[in-house]
Amino acid sequence: MTSARIGPDQRTEALEAMSGGELDVLVVGGGIVGAGVALDAVSRGLSVGLIEARDFASGTSSRSSKLIHGGLRYLEQLDFELVREALVERGLLLHRIAPHLVQPVPFLYPLTKHYERPYVGAGVTLYDTLSMSMGSARGLPHHRHLTRGSALRLFPALRRDSLVGAVQYWDAQVDDARYVLTVLRTAATYGAHVASRVQAVGFLREGEHVTGAQAQDLETGERFDIRAKQVVNAAGVWTDDIQEMVGGRGQIHVRASKGIHLVVPRDRIQASSGLILRTETSVLFVIPWGRHWIIGTTDTDWDLDKAHPAASRTDIDYVLDHVNSVLRVPLTRDDVEGVYAGLRPLLAGESDESSKLSREHTVAHPVPGLVLIAGGKYTTYRVMAKDAVDAVAHGLDGRIPQSVTDRLPLAGAEGYAAMWNQRRKLANESGLHRSRITHLLRRYGTMIDEILGMMAERPDLKEPLTGADDYLRAEIAYAAAYEGARHLNDVLARRTRISIETWDRGIAVSEEAARLMGEQLGWSEEHVEREVAYYRKRIEVERAAQEQDNDNEADAVQHGAPEIVPAASMGAGVS
C-alpha cells in the first residue's frame, strides 16, 4: 500500500471532506495521542477527521526526552502496571509497529554507594522481567552489573569519585515529532482526513449533545462547521481550554509541568552509553542523539504561555549543575548548542509537586458526543488511543471492530528489514554515500523510495544543506510536498531538528530552506522573506528568554515574537 501524502493539495481535499458531510469521529489535537486516536479509529472502519491548531506535534509531542521507555523511576513508586504496560508497548514499537523509527539505546546507572547495588539491581531485574510480557524484551540485552573500571571504560567522561560501580540497562528512543507525522500519514493512508493550522473555536450542539465543531482555517481566516457523531478532545495541555467550550472545567483537570532539555555536541562528553542520574525530585538523562547529546529534564509547574514554554537561565543552570556533578570536564553554557522546553500534560491530584502527579491516562465522556483523553506518556499513546476509541464506540450505533493497531505497522515499516539489508545497493543506485542511506532509512523507512525519486528528478536535491549538512536539500522539499510542513519553522524545528542541532539554531540555513519549501508550496519572494524573518525573530527571542532569571521574565521576552502570519496576510511586516 502506497503511503498517503499530507501535502498542500491533500490538506485542501481534507478540509472539503470534513466540511462536506458527517464524520463518525472528529479528533481535536494533532499530537501523538490525537494521531493515535485517528489511526485507531480509521483502522476500525470509521470515517475520521483530525484538526490541529498549529503544526502537527508542535506542542508536547516534539519536545519530549525522545525516549520510548517503561519509566524506571515509576517502579520506585510501585506503579508496576504502568511500567509493564509501557514496556509491552516499547516491544511492539521496536519490533512490529515502527522498527525504522524506534531504536535501542543503552543507559548507565551509576552507583554511589556499595549498598545500592542489591536495591538497584533488584529494580532493574524487575524492569527486565516486566518487559518480557508478550515477548517485548526480544532483541534488547538484559541489564548487567559493572565494576567502577568497567563503567568508566563505557563512560570515560565520569569522575572516578562519582561512582563505585554501575548497572547498565537498555531502553529505546525515537524522533518524537517524526513519529507523530508517520502515525498521521498512516491514518491518512487508511482514509483519515488530517489538516494542520485549523482551530476548533466552538462546538456544534443539539441540546446537550455535541454534534461537531466550529473550525477556523488559520491560513485563510475562513470559518466552517465539521459535523461528527463523536468528537475526541486530544488537546494535551490544552484539554481544559477545550472543555471550557462545553461549559466549565469538566471531569478532567490537567496541570502543565515544564521540562527543558539541552543539546550539546557529542565530543563534549566522552562516552559510548547513555546515562541516568537521580535528582532531588526525578531523574536526569544524558541521551545519545546522533552527533549530539540530549540532557534533561526539569520538572516544574507552568501556568504561562502553553504554545511557547520558555527555558530560563535558572532552568539551564539547573541541568548543567546536575550533570556537572558527575563529569570529569564540566560543561559550560558555551557548550550548549540547543535548548528546548516542553509541557507534560499531568492529571492533577492531591500533590503540590508536579513530579508526583499521575502519568496514567483518563478517558471521560462529560456530555453526549464528546470524549476526553488526557494524561499518560508518549510510550503508551497507542493504549490511550485504543481506550479513547473504545469510549467513542459507546456513543455510536452498531458494533465497532476491536482495535488492530497492536499489529498494524506504520508507514515505512513494511519491508523495512529487507530494505535495511539493501543499503549498499541503494547507495550504489542513488549515488549517495551509504551513511546518507542509513540516515534516510531511519527517518523514512521504506518511504525512502519517494525521497530518492525526488532526487532522481532533481539531482541538486542530493546536496547537503549549507550550514546543516547532516540533512539533504531533498528532505526540506519532501517535508513540504509530502509531510504537511506549511511554514519554515515546521521544517527546521520538527521535520528536521536543525533548530536544536546547529550552533546558530538554523539561522544560516533558513533562507535556503525557505526557498526549497517555496518551490513546493508556490511562495512568492515576499513570502519567502517573511518566513525567514519570522524564523529569525523566533530564534532571537528564544535566545533572549534563556538569559532571563525566571519563568515570568523568560515568558515575557518570548512574547516579543509574533505567531507566524497566515498566508492570506503576507503583506504585513514582522514586528
Image (cartoon, grey):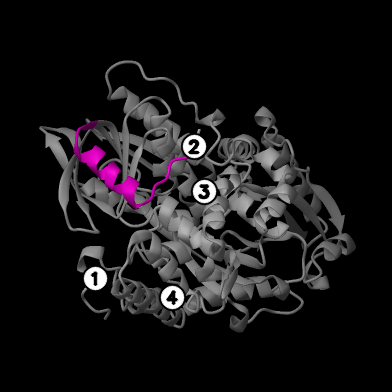
Determine the image quadrant of residue 301: bottom left
- In this rendered view, identify the residue nearer to me: 38 or 381: 38
Q: What is the CA distance from the residue labelled 3 to the residue labelled 2?
A: 18 Å
Q: Give whichever of discs 1 and 3 has the lower sequence position.
A: 3
Identified at 50% across, 73% down, the residue is 315
- Mark pair 1, 4: CA separation: 17 Å
Q: Quadrant of residue 530?
A: bottom left
Amino acid type at image mark 4: Glu
What SS does tag 1 mark?
loop
Q: Is residue 359 magenta?
A: no
Q: Is residue 562 above or below residue 349?
A: below
Residue placed farthest to the front in the image?
457
Pointer 1 with pointer 3, Cβ within 8 A: no
Query: Which badge, 4 or 2, is on the more N-terminal residue?
Result: 2
Residue type of the residue flagged with mark 3: Tyr
Q: Which mark is residue 179?
A: 3
Disc nearer the start of the sequence (1/2) = 2
Q: Position of residue 62 (x, y in %)?
A: 47, 57
Name the N-terminal-most of marks 3 and 2: 2
Q: Pointer 1: what residue?
A: 570
Towards the viewer: 255 or 94: 94
Using the image as rendered, state which of residue 53 and residue 239 is in the foreground: 53
Q: Amino acid at mark 2?
A: Thr
Which numbered circle lies on residue 2?
Answer: 2
Q: Find residue 511 and name its label.
A: 4
